[in-house]
Amino acid sequence: MPRSTSKKPARTDTTNRGSRSSKATAPARLFDVTRSARRPVEGTFEYVPLEQIRLAKNPRRDISPEGIDRLAGMLMSSGQLEPAIGRRFDTDDVMVYAGQRRFLAAQRSGELAGVDGFEGLKPVDTLLVRLLDYTPTDADIRRIQAQENQHEDLSLRDKQDQFADCWLARVGGFEDDRLASVCAELGYDAKLAWNLRRQLTLPDELRGRVSERPSGDQLSIKMANRLADMGETSSSLMHAVAARITTADHHQQALNSIGEFVQRTVIEQPDLYAVRLEEGAAVLDGHEQIERARAHLSSGGRETLVQTLGCDADKLELELQALSARAQRQMFRLDVDRSLRDRAAAGRYAWVHERGADYAAAMWVVAPEFMIAAVHEALAASDSDTAAARDESYFGAADAGDEETEEALANERARREEVRKLHEEATNSNLGLGYDISTGLLEPRGEQLDALRSIVVRLLADQYPSIVAYGAGWTSRERQQPVGDTGRFEPLQVGAIVDAELQRALEDPDPLRGILQFVSRWAAAFVLDPNGVPRTTALGSDRMARKVQAVLPAGESQLRSAVWQLMRPMLSPRLAEVNRDEFVLDDTLALAADIDAARADSALEDIDLGEEQQAA
């Protein structure tokens, strides 16, 4: 193998040394091989002593010792066929980005040279490194290492870590865009990226058990995806199921019938909260369900029940005790019907296992507050029905033996029962919606925030298009057009401005910031300096003054205070001063003058004109 005769770096090929300036930037494509024209090679090549090399952070952590030994033998016998890639930061400091295994093998060669199997070989003391003439960015380093690691597949754990780094570097974007970008950077296909994305939601202890060829208590990728889906609904159920998978047989049982595996887990672990809802075949004891759920309530569940039961937080335990006693006294039974199951599934209060088109889904409620609310609402509906008097006076005078009358009475009762059931289902659905809203807003999803953004900005756009255009049109040159050759500018048409502002708000990666973008343009209409706005144009100060006044009347109001609170931090000192009197009402500065006296007639001699005027 070629070896350096001096500890000083020996350049074997050079490019223009001026290109090694600290101001050099990365090329658009690293080591571009898409052009056939002759040109200098990027960077320089040096034989770098091992003691000058340090390794950059690398996603590869699982490294086969046998593989390192084999590579060390090849380096000693055949030399280094492919250079590492790095950057020199000082005369004795080289950071290597690609070449981790070569460096480790070179170090290992010092221990292997001359021993059995490596007789007559000399240890490696230098590595050939292509030195970049610029400091690569984190994205450059990931691209270099991703291509380098194609030589030998990373372990699944290393792929998880590599994916996590790239994924977190793109936080704030839409999920599909982030996945596509990660695939492009790391060279992953869409299926692998999706699987890694699902595994990223697992806790570390479960992620470390995932294997492409599972054995023992390891988890297959398919099982890991199922656990990740389960964890989105219930972390405790996910951990309990994963804890039972301790052998290959258990793993196969879980894959073949996850529903049965979950039910067995629930039976074997009484401390785990999971209530199976089986439509038409289950009647649950109300008192028992309340007591069991109370023992598993979280702080978030308690907050939900405070809203559902309409009580103070410090009175919640008393309310639950009273509800439990009431259910026990009435021997109340909760019917598991389709409405209850639909609510549990739609609100993600239950983990659902779809069993195919021919079978109803298996379902386990994992939110104890849901079961308490369900019993509470069903009890309230039952009390209402019991209290309602049945009006059968129409048939009171009829002869009990009259067959027509008895048939009519039976039909009437059947009709009333049908009406009662329909009313009960509708009432439960409506009350359930209120509960679902309260619980669903504890952790709003990304699509809900996007929908909120769309509702808010479209309502403002529909109701106040001219106000939005007035605020945006006079505060942004992008929303203006030149007026002939006068050198002046005026706002675009109202519709064009509103559409542009809608697009900006709806395309912002952050829904809340998108709302702020749009609302701020609307609110800007109320704090413009009218001296900077022409009076007679379509969005002129004279034409808009009445509309602005109608939307935000002068005087004290909560809406006016909110507009000031939103805009004040963004106003320049001048605009803040211009608008202060319009928005800031200080009751302590109330006029001390006597209003009646001020309105009374005054004589000229009563007016103090000052000494100079008197002298004149």
Image (cartoon, grey):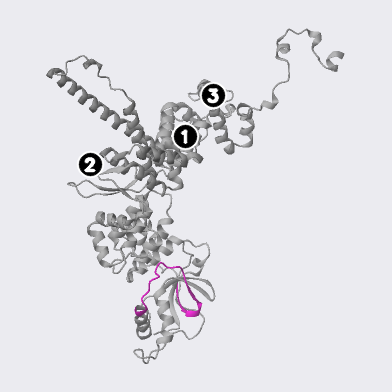
Whole-angstrom CA distance, mark 1 to mark 2, is 62 Å
Tags 1 and 3 touching, CB below 8 Å: no
Q: 343 left or right of 509?
A: left
**Which circle, 1 or 2, is nearer the viewer?**
2
Q: 293 left or right of 561?
A: left
Q: Say which quarter of the image contains residue 212.
A: bottom left
Q: Say which quarter of the image contains residue 150.
A: bottom left
Q: Which residue is mark 1?
A: 479
Element at badge 3?
helix
> What type is the residue that disc 2 sits on?
Gly
Q: Residue 145 appears at what percent x and percent y?
A: 39, 67
Q: Which residue is mark 2?
A: 280
Q: Which residue is mark 3?
A: 541
**Which circle, 3 or 2, is nearer the viewer?**
2
Q: Residue at 26% across / 39% down in the picture?
A: 337
Q: Is residue 501 above or below residue 37?
A: above
Q: Which residues are magenta?
A: 44-66
Most extreme residue toward the right is 615
> What type is the residue that disc 3 sits on?
Ser
Q: Residue 422 appears at what percent x and percent y?
A: 26, 29
Q: Say which quarter of the image contains residue 290.
A: top left
